[in-house]
Amino acid sequence: MAGGIGRTDKILLFAFVLIAFLGIVFIYSATWSGGTGSGHPDAIVIKQCIWVAAGLIILFRSEERRVG
């Protein structure tokens, strides 16, 4: 990663992280059953975390291509 975080637009990065964090919190609160439901709601939260990580990778890769 040649550009690193120094070349990334800080406002865009902050907005992405904030929206992603809120999305994860909302998904967790919507799927949490307090132990009374069936299934494992953490699987959905983990899947969302994977998508957030993929989005961050794509964000930094596209920034690297644009700058480099």
Image: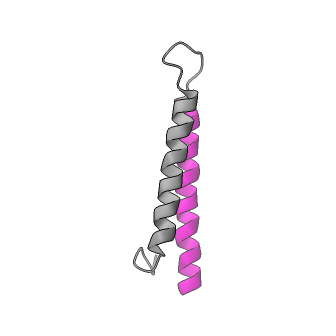
Q: Which residues lie in the magenta part?
A: 42-67
Outermost residue, left side? 6
**The image quarter in which residue 38 lies:** top right
Q: Main secondary structure of the magenta part?
A: helix
Most distant residue in the top direction: 36
Residue 62 at x, y = what percent?
A: 59, 74
Q: Nearer the viewer, residue 54 or 15?
A: 15
Taking 7 as reference, is 45 left or right? Answer: right
The correct choice, above or below, for 22 with respect to 39 in the image is below
Residue 59 position in % (x across, y down): 56, 68
Coordinates of residue 44 in the picture (x, y in percent): 58, 35
Q: Residue at x 46, y 63 (%)?
A: 14
Q: Is residue 47 magenta?
A: yes
Asked if residue 36 can be seen in this view, the reply is yes
x 49%, y 40%: residue? 25
- Residue in front for this viewpoint, 22 or 47: 22
